[in-house]
């Protein structure tokens, strides 16, 4: 096993990895930018090193600085978390060449699966269902229109090296193609440094289902069942759960076998996720492979009892998986809500500033993966994810009820958050009965925001009554007036009485 691991990340995922290292008796070394000098992950790690200025290219995305630091402090391995360098084949190759273990897959596997057209060709060759479409980049508008007409409109234009919803456009008619093609190509070049584009058939009202796989360097492959990830806003997941209430046992067997075959096709090892689109008939299609630990991995840990980060570390150290497929069973149901610093009432713009109050929920079946606390600063430079709230219960209804309770106990002030919006989603009929798809948020946005605002107004009225009671209780004092403030859904209301 390793003596020291350098964690090339920040925030909640860095904290998550540090805690796993501590339980394994491994020294953890954190890196921090100028914006993260006093962050939680820097204080929890055994060692912490300044890596550069706040802008990511000078710190968390500075390959040479990170690798040089790993060598200097004699780190045995680097854990990338998710984001930043976690799926960068060039970075992984450089780590490998320096004789440092990368806690993740090989650079070759990442390179193969990072290019969507190459991955689609590989999946088709190994019998994994893919969304109908091209398996080579489209090199001209004329070729694209011809392919789209053969596939059948509507179609999606997608960046070959894209991800996170960037470099993707829906086209319903041939006369839309040219403008969409040029715009998608520009976006792909800017975001990924590659303008290659391919075409997929647009699947109407699909579910986004993914399968967690894990494999060691000795050829042992195991799946940890599926996750439901269809609650998305602008192609970014908001709420995830495991298992999916839409997937029956027969479909589960089929999709997990396909996921294992996909991993074997690229000689994959360590933790990874096979993402699928599933239509209303439960036919599923390979979407992409995330060659890293997922943000939503806690829901899988809670239903399986497997610590994925500890397994990642052991695999990188050359050990066998600590369990086999027959050892893994589904226990209960888990839901994860991503707590973001953003303002749902202002088009979900990121909310920056200092967290004044930070009171997180607890109790049976409640887990918080967080990287911030009272006094922490939410910076303009990084993703606005504050924490992940994860709840487990014996069944889905119990998990939903527990999540509702936990969200009501989560209080963050000084910045805006999406907590009330998450509560609106959980109370929506389509979410409760499991009939939502990846278009759920967009199609129900008005009603979701209306519920959020109704709750906020109700809370303000209740706060006003409480404040009035305080005024009455203090009426006979020597105060000439009474002022105060209260936090309602993470927004501050100022109240006064003269």
Image (cartoon, rainbow, N blue to C red):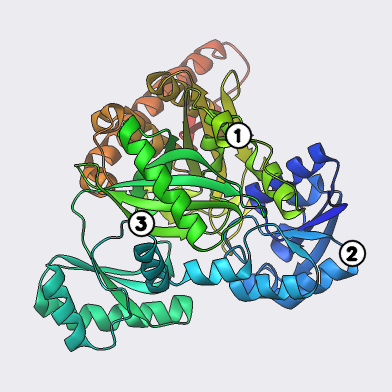
Q: Which mark is residue 73?
A: 2
Q: Are marks 2 and 3 in contact (CB under 8 Å)?
A: no
Looking at the image, is mark 3 or mark 1 nearer the viewer?
3
Residue shown at the point (44%, 42%) measured from the top left? 418
Question: Where does label 3 land, which residue?
Answer: 128
Secondary structure under tag 3 reads loop
Q: CA distance from mark 3 to mark 1?
A: 35 Å
On the picture, is 327 further left or further right than 238? right
Q: Residue 410 at what x, y percent from top left?
A: 54, 30
Marks 2 and 3, the one that precedes in the sequence: 2
Question: Where does label 1 land, which residue?
Answer: 368
Residue shown at the point (10%, 77%) measured from the top left? 174
Marks 2 and 1, the one that precedes in the sequence: 2
| Mark 3, other Cα within 10 Å: few <14 / some 14–19 / many ≥20 | many
Looking at the image, is mark 2 or mark 1 nearer the viewer?
2
Secondary structure under tag 2 reads loop
Looking at the image, is mark 2 or mark 3 nearer the viewer?
3
Residue shown at the point (35%, 42%) measured from the top left? 254
Secondary structure under tag 1 reads strand
Q: Which mark is residue 458?
A: none
Q: CA distance from mark 2 to mark 3?
A: 43 Å
Quadrant position of residue 56: bottom right
Marks 3 and 1, the one that precedes in the sequence: 3
Q: Residue 150 at what x, y percent from top left?
A: 12, 73
On the picture, is 29 further left or further right than 435? right
Q: CA distance from mark 2 to mark 1?
A: 31 Å
Quadrant position of residue 236: bottom left
């Amino acid at each position: 096993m390793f003596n020291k691991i350098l964690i090339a990340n920040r925030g909640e995922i860095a904290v998550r990895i540090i805690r796993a290292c501590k339980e394994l008796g491994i020294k953890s070394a954190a890196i921090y930018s100028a914006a993260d000098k006093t962050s939680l992950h820097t204080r929890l790690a055994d060692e912490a090193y300044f890596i550069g200025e706040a802008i990511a290219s000078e710190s968390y995305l500075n390959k040479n600085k990170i690798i040089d630091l790993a060598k200097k402090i004699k780190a045995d391995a680097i854990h990338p978390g998710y984001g930043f360098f976690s799926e960068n084949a060039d970075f992984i190759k450089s780590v490998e060449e320096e004789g440092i273990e990368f806690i993740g897959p090989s650079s070759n596997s990442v390179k193969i699966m990072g290019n969507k057209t190459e991955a689609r060709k590989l999946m088709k060759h190994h019998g994994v269902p893919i969304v109908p479409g091209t398996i080579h980049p489209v090199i001209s508008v004329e070729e694209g229109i011809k392919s789209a007409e053969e596939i059948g409109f509507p179609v999606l234009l997608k960046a070959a090296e894209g991800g996170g919803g960037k470099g993707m456009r829906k086209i319903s008619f041939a006369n839309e193609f040219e403008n969409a093609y040029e715009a998608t190509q520009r976006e792909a070049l800017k975001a990924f440094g590659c303008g290659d584009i391919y075409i997929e058939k647009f699947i109407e009202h699909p579910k986004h289902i993914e399968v967690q796989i894990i494999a060691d360097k000795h050829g042992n492959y195991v799946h940890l069942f599926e996750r439901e990830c269809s609650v998305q806003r602008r192609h970014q997941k908001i709420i995830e759960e495991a298992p999916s209430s839409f997937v029956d046992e027969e479909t589960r067997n089929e999709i997990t076998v396909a996921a294992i075959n996909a991993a074997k096709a690229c000689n994959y090892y360590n933790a990874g996720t096979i993402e699928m689109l599933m239509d209303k008939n439960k036919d599923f299609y390979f979407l992409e492979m995330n060659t890293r630990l997922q943000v939503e991995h806690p829901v899988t840990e809670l239903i399986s009892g497997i610590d994925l980060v500890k397994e990642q570390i052991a695999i990188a150290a050359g050990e066998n998986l600590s369990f086999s497929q027959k050892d893994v069973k589904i226990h209960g149901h888990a839901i994860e809500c991503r707590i973001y610093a953003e303002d749902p009432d202002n088009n979900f713009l990121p909310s920056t500033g200092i967290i004044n109050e930070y009171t997180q929920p607890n109790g049976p079946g409640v887990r918080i993966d967080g990287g911030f606390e009272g006094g922490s600063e939410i910076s303009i430079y990084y993703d606005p994810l504050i924490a992940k709230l994860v709840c487990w219960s014996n069944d889905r209804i119990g998990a939903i009820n527990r999540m509702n309770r936990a969200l009501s106990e989560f209080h963050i002030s000084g910045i805006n958050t999406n907590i009330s919006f998450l509560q609106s989603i959980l109370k929506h009929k389509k979410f409760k009965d499991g009939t939502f798809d990846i278009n759920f948020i967009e199609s129900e946005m008005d009603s979701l925001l209306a519920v959020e605002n109704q709750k906020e107004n109700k809370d303000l009225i209740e706060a006003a009554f409480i404040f009035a009671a305080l005024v009455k209780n203090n009426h006979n004092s020597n105060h000439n007036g009474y002022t105060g403030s209260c936090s309602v859904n993470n927004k501050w209301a100022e109240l006064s009485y003269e």
